[in-house]
Amino acid sequence: MSNRGFKMIAVVSIAVFVCGAGLSRAGAPAQALIAADNAKQHRPDPKEARRLYDAGATFVDVRTDREWSGGYVKRAIHIPLKDVAADAAAKLPDRNLPIVTYCAAGPRAAKGAAILRKLGYHNVTAMTGGYSDWNAAGGPVEMPR
């Protein structure tokens, strides 16, 4: 087995250990998947993000209010990119939550994830593509009331 293979096994083993150390059951599978993705410097596409969603990850929509009003990932938390630094602590009090950020096309999601990491969130990844790709892939969506 290659050195890279051993590193990947080590990272996944650590993620599984950490997830078993008192974190929520719903979040543990998502945290392990996010740790594996981050170890490979890989961002999930909408299909892969669906696995994270089904495993209990919290989705954070960093689009504008106007974009949000056109629909969003079911159960998502809305924090426009310009407000992530100021509002994250209030809307995401658990810094160990598995989090997937998304936007309309991908770049703002990556910026939002980077801000959350700087704020001390440990299990964050950003979905490639965007909301329309999630919707086209059959991901669960809602409309504002």
Image (cartoon, rainbow, N blue to C red):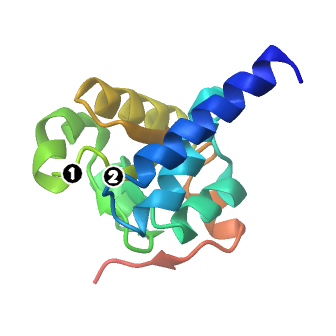
Residue in view at x 61 percent, y 72 percent: 139
96 sits to left or right of 71:
left
Residue in view at x 54 percent, y 49 percent: 32
Q: How many marks?
A: 2
* Whole-percent x, y for residue 10 in the image: 63, 30
What mark, if any, has residue 97 been given in the picture? Answer: 2
* Whole-percent x, y for residue 133 in the image: 66, 58
* Whole-percent x, y for residue 145 in the image: 28, 84
Secondary structure at badge 2 equals: loop
**What amino acid type is highlighted by mark number 1?**
Asp
Q: Which residue is mark 1?
A: 94
39 sits to left or right of 91:
right
Relative depth, front residue between 41 and 87: 41
Residue farthest along the bottom direction in this orientation: 145
**What amino acid type is highlighted by mark number 2?**
Leu
Residue farthest along the right direction in this orientation: 1
Relative depth, front residue between 56 and 22: 22
Location of residue 51 by image quarter: bottom right
Relative depth, front residue between 134 and 47: 47
CB atoms at circles 2 and 1 under 8 Å apart?
yes
Callout 1: few (<14), some (14-19), or many (20+) C-alpha neighbours within 10 Å? few
